[in-house]
Amino acid sequence: MKKLKRWRRWIGNERGSQLIEFLAVFPMIVMALLFIWQMALVAYTVVVAEAAARDGARVAAVGGDYEAAVERAAYGLDVSSNSYSSSTDYGEEVTVTVTASIPSIKIPFIGKIEETLTADASMPKEDED
């Protein structure tokens, strides 16, 4: 009978239950934080790549070295860029395309994500006098 009372008291004891609940939820909290950080890296890449394409197009419109402008504007990103001119009804236009690889973190059970992002910008070509 004494053993049964001890057993019931031990089963009814809730000491340590908060620790068990925390240990169950903690991996989900870490995964959520890693996911949020990865989305911040994607957003950063989008903003910087678009700005680099715009800066490169401005420099290419006046006949400058657009590749150097893109490299300066996209500092910290792994980029490759190209440019081409196209004729439109309104005149000649310069378009610069920037392709950047998205920096990523290695998320447990998912791995590292290898993706690229492409941004382009067009500017009217300036007359060279």
Image (spheres, grey):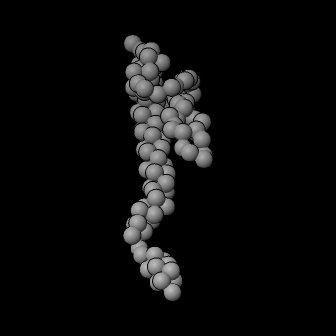
* Residue located 48% across and 83% down the image: 2
Work out whether 64 lies above or below 105.
above
Q: Is residue 46 in view from this perspective?
A: no
- Look at 49% across and 54% down and name the residue there: 27
Relative height, residue 14 to residue 99 (above, below):
below
State the residue in front, 102 or 128. 102
Residue 28 rendering spot, x and y as whole percentages: 49, 57
Residue at the farthest bottom position: 1
Q: Quadrant of the C terminus?
A: top left
Task: Name the residue at the top extreme.
Answer: 129
The residue that appears at 45% across and 51% down in the rendered structure is 30
The image shows residue 106, relative to residue 8, as above or below, that is above
Q: Quadrant of residue 47?
A: top left
Q: Position of residue 26 (x, y in %)?
A: 45, 56
Residue 74 in sight here = yes
Horizontally, residue 46 falls left or right of residue 111, namely: left
Q: Image height check: is 73 above or below 39?
A: above
Residue at the image point whose x is 51% and y is 38% from the top: 105
As rendered, which of 9 and 20 lies closer to the eye? 9
Q: How many marks?
A: 0
Q: Position of residue 76 (x, y in %)?
A: 43, 26
Residue 73 locus on image (x, y percent): 39, 26
